[in-house]
Image (spheres, helix red, strand yellow):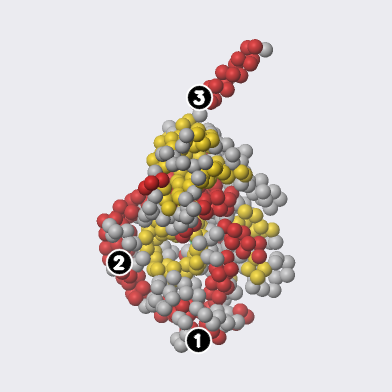
Amino acid sequence: MKKTILSLLIACCTLVTTLAQTKITLNTDLAKTQISKHIYGHFAEHLGRCIYGGIYVGEGNTKIPNTAGVRNDVIQALKELKVPNLRWPGGCFADAYQWKDGIGPKANRPKMVNVWWGGVTEDNSFGTHDFLDLCERIGAEPYLAGNVGSGTVKDLSDWVSYVNHPGGSPMAEARKQNGRATPWNVKLWGVGNEAWGCGGNMTAEYYSNIYRQYATFMSDSKDAVLYKIASGASDGDYAWTETLMKNIPHKMMQAVALHHYSVLGWTVDKGPSVDFNEAQYFKIMEEAWQMDEFIKGHSTIMDKYDPQKKIDLIVDEWGGWYSVEPGTNPGFLYQQNTMRDAMIAGLTLNIFNNHADRVRGANLAQIVNVLQSVILTNEEKMLLTPTYHVMKMYNVHQDALLVPISIESPSYNFQGKELTAVSASASKDASGALNISLTNIDYSKPHEVTINLRGEDFSKMSGKILSSAKINDHNTFEQPNKVSVKDFSGAKLEKGVLKLTIPAYSVIVLNVKK
Ligand code: AHR
């Protein structure tokens, strides 16, 4: 018996001593850069069941409670999430979209084929008014992606006028006839999407000229000075960013975009969204960490042409991309969402926050039923994914001041390769409270974390944790709360140092105040 107790003690001590140490120092006195709330933006494309079924179920729907055809459960969940901006109508769809087909009496709207996503018929029943009214309902700023791939300069110029001109112009009068007297004053505009690919297969030089031409006819109005976003590079295509920064006059462009997905490879089989193995998990984490490299690379080029950082980097598509759920339309990109996705979200948001001096917006792809969604729906049922919970836990950083940190974190090792296990970011809100977010992507090891507050005098502390028994745990329509946020009281504050243990594959957000 004595021997068993002794060996248990030894095993216990070994576990304690082998807990890897993460050391973080917060430089609260250096907090000066604001983390734009727009980093927490979302993206809704006419793709699969994102708009139809996921957001819009039709005005006449008696089975699913709705307001003007938009699901009430989704409106409520998005309000609680504090969505700062919502990008629409694409994606690839944006450069095929004819906005004039989506206004006026719904019965008369022309149909089209959605060539990019499943070849399904688009009846245009969800159009400009539906989208902009939805944004008002959830308190999000609309971000409209203009068509420069197959639409004319006049089409885009008319769209700007239709939504923003106060009155007296043909477009404003048309808007009024369609039931909206006051303009929506949409400021965020994408000038095309993935111009190097589905947006027209253009070269960077050609697109720069197209940008200049289209942007010239996108007019500001009294209450809407436009913020124009150039279609950006994919991943590490630094030459694209360089050409745009060189060829587009900076006064015509407020931001350059960037897209990066965490994907096993651009093949038909992108690995399962739920039953993945550690090799697939590691590779996706590697891809997620690459966001840091790409932001640094694109920022270096932008710094060369814009040292004062007047032009923003907007990562308007990011997230995990896997094979579709078995039995679903391959063109609909419907996938489940597990604790692995929570890791992508926590890590990526930390990266964005820490680059807040250049990254001033981002859009997770996509909001409902497509890729790394925050919400999944099945007829009248709806669930919140682990990614939703992370986005909500992190929304405390929106518009707060970034607290620069230094961090030493051990690695998560797999088959001779290594990744930083614990990532973190911190901010100071208007009340002076600190919010610290931590994500441990390690597949099996908890990590001990010490956070040095450098003499700052805080006494109150609270926390939230998203954690689950298995890395592939997820919420289903039968068990919608299997993965959910819990209060976290495991952090101790002693003499200006916070100490806690973060479990493997989990996310913690701490709030400390005086
Ligand atoms: O989000 C899905 C697609 O990915 C978008 O339509 C496109 O812009 C990107 O390639």
Total marks shown come to 3
**Amino acid marked by disc 3:** Thr
**Amino acid marked by disc 1:** Glu
Image depth: mark 1 or mark 3 in front: 3
Image depth: mark 3 or mark 2 in front: 3
Any mark on residue 173, and which? 1
Residue 65 locus on image (x, y percent): 70, 67
Residue 125 in sight here = yes
Viewed as shown, does residue 247 lie left or right of 103?
left
Q: Which residue is mark 3?
A: 17
**Residue at x-position 49% and y-position 53%:** 431
Residue 230 locus on image (x, y percent): 37, 65
Local crowd size for mark 2, using a 10 Å CA cut-off: few (<14), some (14–19), many (≥20) = some
**Residue at x-position 55% and y-position 66%:** 139
Relative to 319, say whether 471 is above or below: above
Residue 251 locus on image (x, y percent): 31, 69
Viewed as shown, does residue 218 lie left or right of 300?
right
Circle nearer the N terminus (3, 2): 3
Q: Which residue is mark 2?
A: 250
The secondary element bearing badge 1 is classed as helix
Residue 49 locus on image (x, y percent): 60, 62
Furthest-top residue in view? 2
The secondary element bearing badge 3 is classed as helix
- C-alpha separation, residue under disc 3 versus residue under disc 2: 55 Å
Q: Between residues 29 and 44, which one lies in front from this camera angle?
A: 29
Circles 1 and 2: CB atoms closer than 8 Å: no
- C-alpha separation, residue under disc 1 versus residue under disc 3: 72 Å
The secondary element bearing badge 2 is classed as helix
Circle nearer the N terminus (1, 2): 1
Q: Between residues 475 and 28, which one lies in front from this camera angle?
A: 28
- C-alpha separation, residue under disc 1 versus residue under disc 2: 33 Å
